[in-house]
Image (cartoon, rainbow, N blue to C red):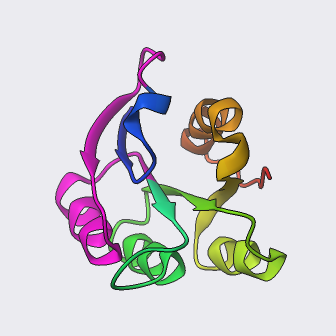
Amino acid sequence: MPVDAAAPSGHLAPYSGISVIGEAGTGDDDVTEARRLRPAVAIIDFQLPTMSGIEATKLIKLESPSTAVIGLTAGVPDDTEKAMLNVGAVAVLDKAGLLQTLHPTIVEAVKGQNFCLG
């Protein structure tokens, strides 16, 4: 499954069946890359230069509804997680547990299930 990752791609290296097809450093770049690559999953950080992860998620979902967006946070308030889910993210993960949660979340995201792990 193709993934556009804002998270370190090294987290996904041990897993077969997942190909990181793009990486971006800003919200604008995330939206542009998702538009260009049409990944199955886009991993979007909440705090991005140029626009928030919430805005980037909203734009990605408007342009590519089939792309599952996984939001990343670093201990932000619950309302931030809710906002990302409200604009179309299928899950929101805390970076502190990313090593354990990222792969299973991607697998579930491509199955079309909405959930939140923190």
Q: Is residue 10 magenta?
A: no
Q: Is the N terminus in the top left, top right, bottom left or bottom right quadrant? A: top left
Q: Is residue 104 left or right of residue 64?
A: right
The quarter holding residue 94 reads bottom right
Q: Residue at x 42, y 42 (%)?
A: 8
Q: Is residue 15 left or right of residue 108?
A: left
Q: Farthest residue toward the left?
A: 36
Q: Position of residue 27 (x, y in %)?
A: 35, 75
Q: Position of residue 35 (x, y in %)?
A: 23, 65
Q: How many tags in the picture?
A: 0
Which segment is the magenta one?
13-42
Q: Residue at x 41, y 22 (%)?
A: 13
Foreground of the two, 55 or 39: 55
Q: Is residue 37 magenta?
A: yes
Q: Is residue 77 above or below residue 116?
A: below
Q: Is residue 62 above or below residue 42?
A: below
Q: Position of residue 86 (x, y in %)?
A: 67, 78
Q: Residue at x 23, y 61 (%)?
A: 33
Q: Residue at x 76, y 53 (%)?
A: 115
Q: Is residue 55 above or below residue 14?
A: below
